[in-house]
Amino acid sequence: NAGVMQNPRHLVRRRGQEARLRCSPMKGHSHVYWYRQLPEEGLKFMVYLQKENIIDESGMPKERFSAEFPKEGPSILRIQQVVRGDSAAYFCASSRDSTGNTIYFGEGSWLTVV
Amino acid sequence: AQRVTQPEKLLSVFKGAPVELKCNYSYSGSPELFWYVQYSRQRLQLLLRHISRESIKGFTADLNKGETSFHLKKPFAQEEDSAMYYCALRTQGGSEKLVFGKGMKLTVNP
């Protein structure tokens, strides 16, 4: 089991461009979570998805950010019109269907906005 | 609202010294607490969960509901323990997300 796979690991975007971060959950996992880690800060929850459904997006900024987890393919976190403040590490995590299962994290995608 | 507090940002000790990483939480439901460790620019790894009541890499943590704490302890720190440590609370119900503390950087000096 390859674990939670994120790509790209590092992404540089100019202000105003779009950033797309991809996450493939562990095999057999249908729950995906996205977290953001700003410099010198802890991880902040952004969004929780199951296949084709957004369960909790209470941590997502109201504008420019969106997430999806289609029936086929990876989960995608999309940031439109990036600004310098979006520079952060974005971590994806996944878990199995049932309640109480361990949440496993990917290695993160580091977004730098220049 | 759920909240996890790690009151100290940095802790530096010498090899062989005991360490205690503090964690307090605020949650109205029945808490499920975790400790995650993040070595330099690597993924977060689960270190401990309170329901397992196990010792991993010499670390232990006991949930104290009276003090709403879940402090992480190790009697003899090793250099390879140097990392960021995050305490986390899992919410229950419809959205089982993890709520993290801000983390604490542990440095173990030779």
Image (cartoon, rainbow, N blue to C red):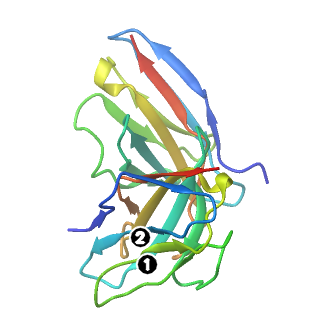
Who's the residue at 35% across and 85% down the image? B30
Depth check: A83 or A48 in front? A83
Look at label 1 and name its amino acid: Glu
Q: Which residue is mark 2?
A: B90
Q: Which residue is mark 1?
A: B32
The picture places residue B78, in percent across and down from the top left corner, at: 66, 59
Who's the residue at 56% across and 34% down the image? A22
Crowding at mark 2 (Cα within 10 Å: few <14, some 14-19, many 20+): many
Point out the residue furthest to the right here: A1
A84 left or right of B41 in image: left
Q: Earlier in the sequence, mark 2 or mark 1?
A: 1
> Hey, which quadrant is residue B16 in on the image?
bottom right
Q: Tell me if I can see residue B31 in this picture.
A: yes
Give me the C-alpha separation between circle 2 and circle 1: 5 Å
The picture places residue A89, in percent across and down from the top left corner, at: 46, 34
Who's the residue at 56% across and 50% down the image? B83
Check the residue under mark 1 and report the chain it is in.
Answer: B
Who's the residue at 65% across and 53% down the image? B79
Q: Are marks 2 and 1 in contact (CB under 8 Å)?
A: yes
> Hey, which quadrant is residue B51 in on the image?
bottom right
Q: Tell me if I can see residue A31 in this picture.
A: no
